[in-house]
Amino acid sequence: MVAGRPNYGCDFGRNIWNSHTGVSTHVDEVRADFSAMAAMGTEVVRWFVFTDGRGGVRWGTDWRLEGLDEMFFADMDAALECARDAGVRLCLVLFDYAWMHDRLRRALATRHRTDMIGVLIEPLLDAYGTDGSRTELGQAIHSFDIINEPDWVTAGLEPPLGRETLTLDELRAFAGDVSARLHARSSALVTLGGGRVRFAAEWDHPAYGLDFVQVHSYPDVRYQDRDVTVFGRTAASFGLSKPLLIGEHPASPRQHPADHLPPAYWVEDYQMLAREGGYLGAWPWSFKGVDAFGAVHRD
């Protein structure tokens, strides 16, 4: 957030409105946030990077992808320095599923994914990978999250009506290619932010090449059959070959429309479930409170 407002897609590099509100423009505020998170015992912070393509990326006049914005590395350096100095590491979410809403950007991720990886992923690894120019800073990267909640736009994974933009084969090929490049040049872990618990087994498929499976778990009082709950289940009960992380859960049910739900949906119970159920961890969404799921209470 900047000045109390969400800064989605604009934390790294200039944006499509030709302004710059990236991390380096308010680094003292970001540093204070990381100090506060570290004091709370936070080990990893999940942070969106390219989102839907509105920031950090240079687009040509014909919407051809040209490369990273000139301010991208100033902002990424600042973010990694803030994390490193606080003793926290980052899970960098490369893309959001909203990237796939645009026909041309979707084509980059499917038919022209080699070009997309060369223009965006390789320069990132040139800087922060194991053989990069900023390898020391790259040690603050815990993991790369290839794409956030792609099940909302992928046929076969029950997306909302009219929102199908990817086939399952396209998603697997795209994620698999990105994963291979990340593993080849970085020691960071690789994951994918699955939007629903019911599809945990999909992300365990070898085509993705992930190091751990990630699912997001929210109470949904409007569509109670749309997903299953993690409560009452151990990580082992999913029968996965990789560790399982609860990558998002409500930070504050007091601000959620379903605040009348039973105590099992309180943030402390997600944390206890993770500890006692053999999960890799549980990450509350979100520290800054950017939506109805609330902010983490610093006390």
Image (cartoon, rainbow, N blue to C red):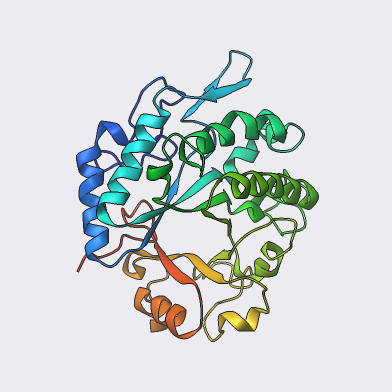
The image position of residue 209, as x and y in percent, is 68, 57
Residue at 44% across, 34% down: 133
- Across and down, in percent, residue 30 comes to 26, 44
For the C terminus, the quadrant is bottom left
Return the x and y of residue 221 as percentages of the image width and height. 51, 70
Residue 140: tell me if it is visible.
yes
- Count the labels in the image: 0
Q: Is residue 199 above or below residue 14?
A: below
Residue at x 36%, y 69% (from the top left corner): 253
Q: Closest to the observer: 157 or 277? A: 277
Along the viewing direction, whichever of 236 and 218 lies nearer the viewer = 236
Instruction: Identify the residue at horizontal 22%, vertical 55% (top origin).
Output: 35
| Quadrant in the picture for the N terminus | top left
- In the picture shown, does residue 133 fall above or below 232? above
Residue displayed at 59% across by 13% down: 61
Query: Quick check: can you spot residue 11?
Result: no
**Residue 18 quadrant:** top left
Farthest top residue? Answer: 61
Residue at the far front in the pictured view: 131
